[in-house]
Image: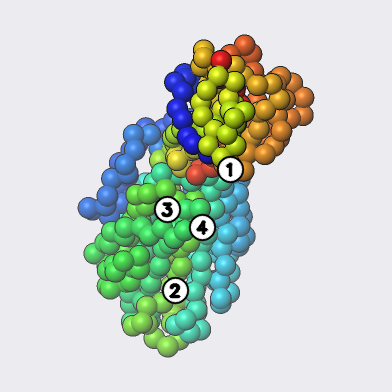
């Protein structure tokens, strides 16, 4: 069908749930030269204050931060971890004074291929994050190696690793290269994700230079600083001639012709947009056609029937639409990152 454009006023409102904003800070445990986070407000997972506290030996725990929601950590290992770990400990403290807690792992693997993992899963993507791993080093009995990857909507995201004096980096892999005291900053390795990420996986094991039967080795995951999730709503409006009563193959925008409008709202941000309301004024030279409103996730797939009022079950399925005079309103409780809603209605050319 031919496409035409009628001028209209389109407004969109977004209400975010209250969030606790914490100013971005400089953390002493980061390795020198680490990238700065590209945001002005951050939220931090702090092992010293996070509740509920990690139970020594437990393999998972969940936490909640205001403005972020509930997120979880899960630990797995191909060879049993040393008794009592994972645990919160200052045994590897990155040279911090006073020492701070970190999620501490101690392994005594039987072979070089053995490894353990820490997986952090977020409820929504954050624009960027940064954290440090303590005591990534090497001795005659072991060679630490970590590999860090992230995901965003299922796609792999790679971080920037910044090494300390006792380790080296290659891409997203860090390997111990010299001895470091457990409580010194020599083995600190900083991980920075500068683009959106919704999960991270830290694989901890042995480098190729480790003995065939590695000795006891340990590391700690320190606090995690995250940029606050953001939303970015982009709205587009298209129109097409449905019929003009004369030509079925090539209808024109003539009096009494029917025009189909589609308003598409896309969340291109990393956070979930909540309580989204979009309004559109039907142009003065057109008249809204009752009973034509539809909703969906795209203009082509907008086939959920919406009535003309703002009451009833259709208002939350999951999109609601209503009309009052010449103003069409659409609303939804949330739009996930990369999510869309489509609002469709017809009007008659006067």
Alpha carbon distance from label 3 to label 1: 47 Å
Front position among marks 2 and 3: 2
Label at residue 300:
1
Alpha carbon distance from label 1 to label 4: 25 Å
Q: Residue furthest right?
A: 312
Alpha carbon distance from label 2 to label 3: 18 Å
* Residue on which disc 3 sits: 222
Marked residue nearer the N-terminal end (3 or 4): 4
Q: Quadrant of the C terminus?
A: top right
Label at residue 256:
none
**Residue occupying image coordinates x 28% and y 59%:** 162
Circle 1 sits in a helix, a strand or a loop, which is it? loop
Marked residue nearer the N-terminal end (2 or 4): 4
Q: Residues within 10 Å of mark 1 (few under 14, many from 20)?
A: few
Front position among marks 3 and 1: 1
**In the displayed structure, would residue 95 be above or below residue 5?**
below
Marked residue nearer the N-terminal end (2 or 3): 2
């Amino acid at each position: 069908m031919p496409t035409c454009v009628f001028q209209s006023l389109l407004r969109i409102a977004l209400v975010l749930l209250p969030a606790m904003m914490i100013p971005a800070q400089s953390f002493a445990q980061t390795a020198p030269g680490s990238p700065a986070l590209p945001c002005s407000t951050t939220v931090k997972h702090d092992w010293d204050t996070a509740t509920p506290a990690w139970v020594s030996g437990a393999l998972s725990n969940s936490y909640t931060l205001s403005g972020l929601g509930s997120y979880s950590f899960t630990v797995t290992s191909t060879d049993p971890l040393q008794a009592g770990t994972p645990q919160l400990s200052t045994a590897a403290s990155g040279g911090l004074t006073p020492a701070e807690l970190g999620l501490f792992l101690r392994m005594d693997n039987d072979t070089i291929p053995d490894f353990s993992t820490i997986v952090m899963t977020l409820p929504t993507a954050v624009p960027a994050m940064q954290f440090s791993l303590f005591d990534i080093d090497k001795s005659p009995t072991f060679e630490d190696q970590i590999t860090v990857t992230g995901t965003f909507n299922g796609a792999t995201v790679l971080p920037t690793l910044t090494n300390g004096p006792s380790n080296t980096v290659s891409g997203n892999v860090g390997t111990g290269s010299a001895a470091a005291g457990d409580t010194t900053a020599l083995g600190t390795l900083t991980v920075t994700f500068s683009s959106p990420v919704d999960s991270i996986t830290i694989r901890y094991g042995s480098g190729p230079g480790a003995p065939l039967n590695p000795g006891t080795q340990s590391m700690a995951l320190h606090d995690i600083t995250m940029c606050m999730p953001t939303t970015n709503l982009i709205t587009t409006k298209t129109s097409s001639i449905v019929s003009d009563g004369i030509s079925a193959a090539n209808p024109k925008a003539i009096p009494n012709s029917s025009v189909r409008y589609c308003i598409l709202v896309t969340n291109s941000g990393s956070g979930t947009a909540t309580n989204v309301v979009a309004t559109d004024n039907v142009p003065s030279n057109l008249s809204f056609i009752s009973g034509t409103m539809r909703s969906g996730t795209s203009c082509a797939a907008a086939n959920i029937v919406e009535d003309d009022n703002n009451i009833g079950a259709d208002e939350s399925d999951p999109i609601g639409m209503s009309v009052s005079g010449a103003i069409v309103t659409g609303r939804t409780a949330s739009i996930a990152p990369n999510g869309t809603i489509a609002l469709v209605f017809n009007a008659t050319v006067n």
